[in-house]
Image (cartoon, rainbow, N blue to C red):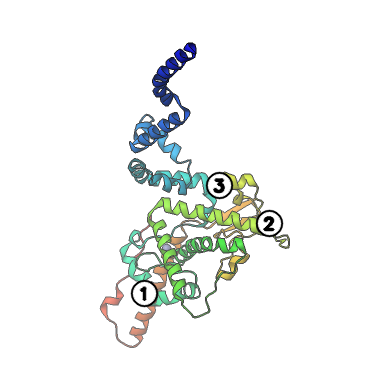
Amino acid sequence: MPKADTFEDEELEALDDKTEALTLRSKRTERLRKKQTKKAMKMKDIPQDFLGLLPYELILQILTLLKPSELFRLQQTSKWFYEFITQEETRIARTVLGLRYSCLEKSFRLPVLLADIDPAIHSLLQTPERQEILTIHKKPYQHIRPPEPTEVCTCLTCTLRWSALAIIVDFAHWQEHLDKGEPIPMVPRGKFPEWNQTIITAHAAIVRKALYSPLWYARLLEVHLDSTTRSIRRHVANKGNKRRRFRMTDDDVNSGTDAFLTRSGPPSLDFPYHRDNYYLLETFVPNRSWSQDWSRWLYVPAEQHDRDIEFVVMWAERRRRAELEQQQAEGNVPGHTSRPLPQPEQA
Ligand SMILES: [Zn+2]
């Protein structure tokens, strides 16, 4: 029919025109176009374009709402974020620690770097006699590599601080086993299998990062909060375990903060001397005890390191005097030993 033919012709003609128009308007193409635009925007330095519109301090505040792990991931997304977070690492980490880990921060303090201690005291800290005394805090641990005395302060407080941080990493390493109820491979006493040496060396390297980077330190506390909530959940699920434990709700876990650990709860400072202890370990939050009078946890103060350094100096002075007296008794007094020992600088 002519009408039909006309229609067909018109339709065909129109179809030619519409083909392009349809292509442009099709949902599929639209999606593709959006995807391409998005990709193109990503390729450009979008954070700079976008965040450049915001005041510097506001960007900083937004970032401090993120978890340390999220900040590390964000840092990998662009050069701009990498440089911004690196530049503001201390400020960001300090705020994140205050918002999320104010309790763990006081329990897991960082050991002091030797570089931050009066050089006159280095030799006193590193005397073989002192290192011998410290072996009691090093040798029995198969799951902790001790700190390097040339890098980290080896006063008793700092040695314990190092060990507590190393426990964070090791305890986190075995969470999968603990969740699945799989046994943790044990190291026979007096043996040093290569697999274990590899693990504890890697863990020591992570602890070292925390000594120099506040964001890594915050990351360690994030990891420990995760291990702690997982442990509490495991033990709650074990109906046979009726021990007293911290009250922890889903909201507590979702908050991503350690606020629930500030409530009263069972003592949390039992040190896991061996990986065997991990099976029953729920909350390892050392260096604090519950005060009935104040109805809150009291923490070992940061100044404990200074007290220990004073003790190290006193101990060395006592040894020096004893040696001097012995030499005097033997009638042999070398002049140089009468020099007084250096005193620690007061902060
Ligand atoms: Zn120290």
Q: Secondary structure at mark 1?
A: loop
Q: Are marks 1 and 2 in contact (CB under 8 Å)?
A: no
Dot 3 or dot 2, earlier in sequence: 2
Report the residue marked by disc 1. Answer: 127
- Tell me the CA gap for discs 1 and 3: 42 Å
Q: Amino acid at mark 3?
A: Thr
Give the x, y percent position of residue 280.
63, 65
| Above or below for 186 versus 209 | below
For residue 161, say whether it is visible. Answer: yes
Dot 1 or dot 3, earlier in sequence: 1
Tell me the number on the disc at residue 257.
Answer: 3
Report the residue marked by disc 2. Answer: 236
Q: Secondary structure at mark 2?
A: helix
Dot 1 or dot 2, earlier in sequence: 1
Of residue 208 and residue 155, the one placed in the foreground of this image is: 208
Front position among marks 1 and 2: 2
Front position among marks 3 and 2: 2
Q: Secondary structure at mark 3?
A: loop
Write down the quadrant of residue 40 in the picture.
Answer: top left
Write down the quadrant of residue 322 in the picture.
Answer: bottom left
Q: Amino acid at mark 1?
A: Thr
For disc 2, does the CB lie below 8 Å from ligand 1?
Answer: no
Give the x, y percent position of residue 59.
41, 35
At x 35%, y 46%, the residue is 86
Of residue 301 and residue 169, the one placed in the foreground of this image is: 169
- Image quarter for ligand 1 equals bottom left
- Tell me the CA gap for discs 3 and 2: 20 Å
For residue 341, say whether it is visible. Answer: no
Q: Amino acid at mark 2?
A: Val
- Tell me the CA gap for discs 1 and 2: 48 Å
For disc 3, does the CB lie below 8 Å from ligand 1?
Answer: no
